[in-house]
Image (cartoon, helix red, strand yellow):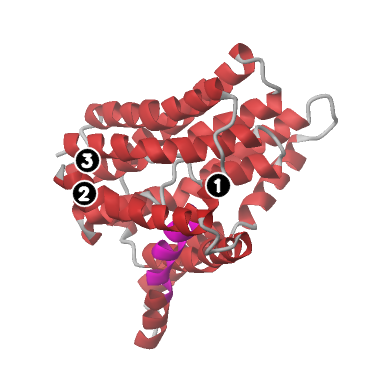
Amino acid sequence: MTILFDVILPVFIIIGFGYLVAWRKMFTEVAVDGLMRFAQNFAVPVLLFANVARLDMAENFNLGMWVAFYSGAFLSYFIGWGLALYWLKRPATDAVAIGFCCLFSNSLLLGIPIMERAYGAQALAGNVAIIAIHSPLLYTFGITMMEITRARGQSLRVGQIAMRALSGVLHTPLIIGILCGAVMNLLMQAGLVMPQGFWAAVDMMAKAALPAALFGLGGVLYRYRPEGDSTAIAICCLCSLVIHPVTTWTLGHLFQLPVGPMRSAVITASMAPGVNAYLFASIYNSAKRVAASTVLVSTALSILTIWFWISVLP
């Protein structure tokens, strides 16, 4: 119970506070959108920039951790996509959006604060290594799958689809923050020394990211009412909260991952789909109701699944 009250609940209390004030109309939808725009377009990219810039790439590179985590992610995608397409008989674009809900973990807004509270700031290196390729890889995959699906019967070439996917990824603020952090990391390794005032400003901005994002996430979740499509929602929750972490944990044991990378991979895999899952569905106007309801339901259920994995892991 200590893990639940000391580690998990503080994060969800902030989300719940944002939900409450949105419900009571003390924080308007316009204000929520503004806060989330600040968090996702500015503060969180700065947080990613700071972490990637200071990351010891050589020390924290662990291929087994990446394979374990992303194998679980892609397995979850194809299970969700296949069931939606062939069992639920959803349109092909809906199946891709549902698969993306199963694929995309809330690795940043939930994963980082939960990991930090559970194991300390020094344990975040593995999470940052996962996040460094999380959005670029999964967004590229999701956009590519959707563009291929939408292009059926058209004369689009592989190059055109690839350019659409690449353009969509490179225009994402989170990706820009990661890429800028990687460039800064290389420059610092080459001998560049930035003034202390620069890093003080970066750290001030970064500290605002998670509280603002969690509070705003609560306000956003208030809009998502669980409606219909219960089977599709259940599939998404099962894939993201069970299949992904179980697969990651199994492969982590097979690869004999050290304690730190194992924790980072499994805890990140156990996170619910983030708001990005809904944004992806909204961009393509596909399975929006399933995505919105999945984000809300799975975020609530993840309190229990995160508690389980933190209790199980060494």
Q: Is residue 186 left or right of residue 1?
A: right
Q: Nearer the viewer, mark 2 or mark 3?
A: 2
The residue that label 1 is drawn on is 276
Say which residue appears at 22% left-offset and 29% top-offset.
253
**What's the CA distance linking mark 2 and mark 3?**
13 Å
* Towards the viewer: 230 or 257: 230
Q: List x then y, in percent, for residue 67.
A: 37, 35
* Residue type, label 2: Phe
Q: Do we see residue 115 in this rendering?
A: yes
- Horizontally, residue 269 falls left or right of residue 307, namely right
Residue 123, image x, y percentages? 23, 54
Residue 200 is tagged as none
Q: Residue 310 carries which label?
A: 3
Q: What stretch is highlighted in magenta?
A: 205-217
Q: Earlier in the sequence, mark 3 or mark 1?
A: 1
**Predominant secondary structure in magenta?**
helix
- 232 lies above or below 1: above
Percent across and percent down for residue 125 are 29, 55
In the rendered structure, find residue 5 and report the number of the disc placed on it: 2
N-term-proximal mark, 2 vs 3: 2
Please identify the quadrant where the N terminus is shown: top left
Tell me: residue 43, above or below residue 65.
below
Whether residues under marks 2 and 1 lie with C-beta atoms below 8 angstroms apart, the answer is no
Residue 108's spot in the image, x, y percent?
Answer: 41, 53
Q: Which quadrant is home to the C terminus? A: top left
**Mark 1 closeness class: few <14, some 14–19, many ≥20 residues within 10 Å:** some
